[in-house]
Image (cartoon, rainbow, N blue to C red):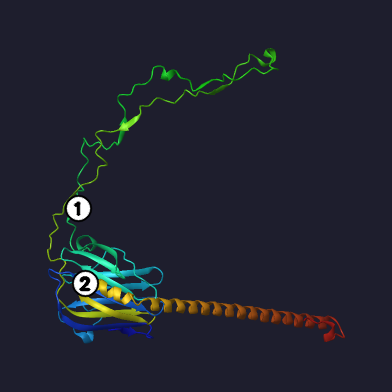
Amino acid sequence: MIINLFNTDARHFAISAKIPEFSNKNRTLVLQYSIRLEQDIECGGDYIKLLSGFVNQKKFGGDTPYSLMLGPDICGSQTKKLHVILSYQGQNYPIKKDLQCETDKLTHFYTFILRPDATYSVLIDGRERDSGSMYTDWEILPSCKIKAVDAKKPADWDDREYIEDPNEVKPEGYDSIQREILDPKAKELDNWDEEEDGIWRPPKVPNPAYKGPWKRKKIKNPNYKGKWKIPWIDNPEFEDDPDLYVLKPIKYVGIEIWQVKGGSIYDNILLCDDPAYAKQVVDEVFANREPEKEAFEEAEKVRKAKEEEDAQRAREEGEKRRRERDYDRRHRDRDCYRDRYKRHRRGYSDDDYHVS
């Protein structure tokens, strides 16, 4: 079924359908659908929702409780977010990760897979975009581990990766090595006069044997334990829920849309327990995607050509207006000078002053 909401700008839509009850207890949940944006979307969201319990479909809307929400949210160049929101005990929890959605005018598939071990995967166009666990990526339950903030580094903890070699001994006479020595290659100048210039002494140069203050070499510390970190301990406030992944039985599928520019096309809505079948659907649809890509590229060429044509027309019109303003200014100045000339000279004729 294709749902096309087109040529209806700045509108909010909500529609739902009742389905055979679906439970993901002890089974994998797969929610998947495709969306195509016919226009450059400025701001809007195209969501799909799984609804549990009784739903008054005539009043279904943004405030209707849901168990799972999936879909892109786009607004300007800053917001390009893919929402994955789960409901637990009546409260909605958005995923903590910043998942990015697609923004072009091609068909794209969004897939969410939730498994009985509370792990999940998010796929776009059949390819995994992210994965993780409900325990860590939603703030549904308190963390099972917390940092032991009162812990202190043990006194015998050695976090020095390198130490001075205790077996190395400073060479005899090392401290007597001078920083500078007399230049052995220097020669007294031929015109040096001791009576006038004093006793000649060779200049000093850096001593190549001088290595600076003596230091023991560094070696690997055999007692190195690594950088000490605050340990993690069991969170006393954590209480596990083995059914964390279980949604309330799904009875409805809903679509909610907010669009500034119309043109949201939904298709291929799928709720099942077989990720392989969901992937098969994506592959089958994309097997015929080339014509769509070609049409999109051709439309982009036409759009860019029209933009350039409009820009050129605007430049030409701007230049025309500029010339008209210059023409008006020149003739206005001519009239001004002519009136002034009339006041100061008798027998003035229009032929005496002319501005072209």
Q: Are marks 1 and 2 in contact (CB under 8 Å)?
A: no
Rendering quarter of residue 126: bottom left
Q: Where the N terminus falls, by quadrant?
A: bottom left
Rendering quarter of residue 242: bottom left
**Amino acid type indicated by mark 1:** Ile
The residue under label 2 is: 30
Where residue 192 sits: x, y (%)?
A: 68, 16
**Amino acid type indicated by mark 2:** Val
Image-based side of 115 in relation to 281, left or right: left
Q: Residue furthest top?
A: 195
| Circle 2 SS class | strand
Residue that appears at 30% across and 80% down? 266
Q: CA distance from mark 1 to mark 2?
A: 32 Å
Where residue 49 sits: x, y (%)?
A: 24, 76
Where residue 115 sits: x, y (%)?
A: 18, 66
**Is any atom of residue 69 visible in this view?**
no
Image-based side of 131 in relation to 310, left or right: left
**Vertically, is 153 above or below 8?**
above
Where residue 131 sits: x, y (%)?
A: 25, 63
| Circle 1 SS class | strand
Tell me the tag on residue 350. Answer: none
Classify 10 Å Cα crowding around label 1: few (below 14), some (14-19), many (20 and above): some
Tell me the tag on residue 146. Answer: 1
